[in-house]
């Protein structure tokens, strides 16, 4: 009598579990070899990607919530933009899979010709910068934000669901609240406003998204929850004391009201009620902030800052205006030397500082339109203005024709585009990755939802055949 021993087949580790172990191992290695902050970032991003594998919307949202934390003043920009680049490569992989499976189609929109012209001028500016032997570091810094705009057609070619957009909103809100906390931390440590990553325009843009969604939701609890979140984000923008943010936010809010209100008295009544509630929340937040940090004259400070917006006198509040005029004058001289094709990406502007009697060089310029003209010529400037106009038009069209939630996202795309277009008048907002990817994300969602509008206009399947059969009879 013989006994046959049966051996169990080898146990296979599920793919998701194996990938989770790999993410943990890479994060641990990054913590030991680089920095534990990098390890935490890799761990969070890795687990998030595993939760929604190869989802293009999710990938684009991850880019949009990561770029506002790229600190151009922190000395670690190469490492931070490297992480952004990895996420972009992941989004391209998601796009390739979508194309392979037939889930992606090129979205038709007014953005397309503007993006094509921007792509051509950017490519020419790269060649121009290389031939002129401009700094490769500055060239790369300026190239990546331009490429960010092309997230829009990538995302616009796939269908986005209501659940997917809700996840996107949640992540955007969390990232904006993290920005708010950074701003409060800056005041707690320095007892004054500082620039850099602590005060970006991202909370203002997310506040506009919440505003347009709150106006269109019938859930009263959700509406007032959004209002409270908006209050925290608007407070952050106010205490940044960045006048460009203020004017941009006002422009975005006004466009949001006009798109929603139209000629409806009932809708303007809702706008009035929401505005009153928002004003109370904002005032209470400002008073609390002022008393907490010892700014009893917070409203006087805001008024003085606002009054100094259009003056170039010698006071402390207007010195930044004078510095901008000096920058603009130097930029216009350089533009006059090469107005059609610009000086190429990576160009360093020489600015004579009359106050200090020195000449400084800088790759940035506190005016995005002059900076675009300086680097990419008049055709690059036309492409940028055309793109912004097309973005506003795309969002307005969707806000007028789509159902409530989709209309809210489209209205947000329009109002945020106008907001950053105004901010660009006094800041180099389009020369960093902080804003472009967020705006492109909103354009992509607007393009995706506009497919519903096109489908609604199209005749029902088989309708032409039925009409032809009727005529034949």
Image (cartoon, rainbow, N blue to C red):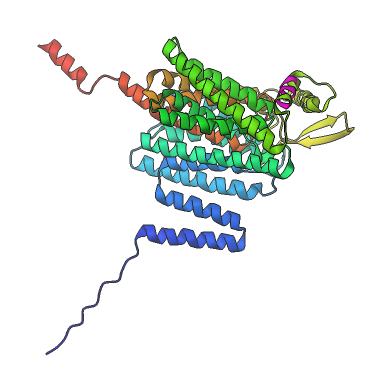
Left or right of residue 308, residue 226 in this image? left
> Is 132 drawn above or below residue 329 in the view shown?
below
Q: Position of residue 140 (x, y in %)?
A: 64, 41
Rendered-image quadrant of the C terminus: top left
Looking at the magenta stretch, what is its main secondary structure? helix
> How many labels were placed on the picture?
0
Q: Residue furthest bottom?
A: 1
Range covered by the magenta-colored residues: 301-307
> Is 211 drawn above or below residue 471 in the view shown?
below
In terms of depth relative to the viewer, which is nearer, 149 or 193?
A: 193
| Quarter occupied by residue 294 | top right
Left or right of residue 289, residue 406 in this image? left
Q: Residue at x 20, y 82 (%)?
A: 5
Q: Residue at x 57, y 34 (%)?
A: 232
> Is 363 drawn above or below residue 275 in the view shown?
below
* Residue 306 belongs to magenta span: yes
Q: Residue furthest left?
A: 473
Q: Position of residue 1 (x, y in %)?
A: 11, 90
Q: Residue at x 85, y 31 (%)?
A: 353
Q: Position of residue 461 (x, y in %)?
A: 22, 23
**Is residue 53 in view from this perspective?**
no
Left or right of residue 338, residue 439 in this image? left
**Is residue 405 in view from this perspective?**
yes
* Residue 165 belongs to magenta span: no
Q: Residue furthest right?
A: 357
> Is 158 drawn above or below residue 329 in the view shown?
below
| Quarter occupied by residue 154 | top left
Q: Position of residue 258 (x, y in %)?
A: 50, 15
In terms of depth relative to the viewer, which is nearer, 91 or 222?
A: 222
């Amino acid at each position: 009598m013989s006994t046959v021993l049966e051996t169990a087949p080898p146990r296979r580790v599920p793919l998701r579990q194996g990938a989770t172990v790999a993410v943990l191992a890479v994060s641990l290695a990054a913590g030991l070899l680089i920095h534990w902050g990098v390890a935490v970032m890799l761990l969070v991003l890795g687990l998030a990607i595993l939760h929604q594998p190869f989802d293009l919307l999710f990938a684009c949202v991850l880019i949009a919530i990561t770029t506002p934390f790229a600190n151009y003043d922190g000395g670690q920009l190469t490492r931070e933009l490297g992480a952004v680049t990895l996420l972009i490569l992941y989004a391209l992989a998601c796009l390739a899979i979508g194309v392979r499976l037939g889930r992606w189609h090129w979205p038709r929109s007014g953005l397309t010709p503007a993006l094509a012209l921007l792509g051509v001028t950017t490519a020419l500016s790269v060649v121009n910068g290389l031939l002129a032997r401009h700094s490769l570091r500055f060239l790369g810094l300026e190239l990546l934000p331009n490429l960010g705009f092309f997230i829009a057609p990538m995302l616009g070619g796939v269908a986005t669901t209501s659940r997917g957009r809700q996840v996107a909103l949640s992540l955007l809100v969390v990232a904006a609240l993290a920005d708010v906390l950074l701003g409060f931390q800056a005041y707690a440590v320095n007892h004054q406003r500082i620039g850099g990553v602590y005060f970006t325009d991202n909370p203002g843009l997310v506040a506009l998204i919440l505003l347009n969604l709150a106006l269109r939701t019938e859930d009263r609890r959700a509406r007032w929850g959004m209002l409270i979140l908006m209050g925290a984000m608007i407070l952050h923008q106010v205490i940044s004391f960045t006048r460009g943010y203020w004017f941009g936010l006002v422009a975005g809010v006004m466009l949001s009201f006009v798109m929603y209100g139209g000629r409806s008295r009932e809708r303007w009544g809702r706008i009035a009620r929401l505005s009153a509630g928002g004003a109370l929340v904002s005032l209470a937040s400002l008073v609390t902030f002022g008393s907490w940090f010892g700014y009893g004259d917070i409203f006087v400070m805001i008024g003085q800052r606002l009054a100094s917006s259009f003056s170039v006198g010698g006071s402390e509040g207007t010195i930044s205006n004078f510095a901008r005029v000096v920058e603009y004058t130097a930029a216009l001289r350089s533009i006059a030397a090469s107005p059609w094709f610009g000086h190429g990406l990576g160009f360093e502007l020489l600015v004579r500082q009359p106050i200090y009697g020195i000449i400084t060089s800088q790759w940035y310029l506190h005016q995005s339109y002059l900076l675009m003209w300086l680097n990419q010529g008049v055709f690059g400037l036309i492409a940028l203005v055309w793109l912004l106009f097309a973005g506003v038009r795309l969002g307005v069209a969707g806000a007028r024709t789509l159902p409530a939630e989709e209309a809210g996202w489209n209205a947000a795309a329009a109002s945020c585009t106008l907001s950053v277009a105004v901010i660009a008048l006094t800041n180099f907002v389009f020369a960093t990755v902080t804003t472009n990817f967020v705006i492109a994300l909103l354009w992509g969602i607007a393009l995706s939802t506009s497919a519903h509008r096109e489908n609604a206009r199209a005749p029902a399947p088989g309708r032409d055949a039925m009409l032809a059969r009727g005529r034949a009879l």
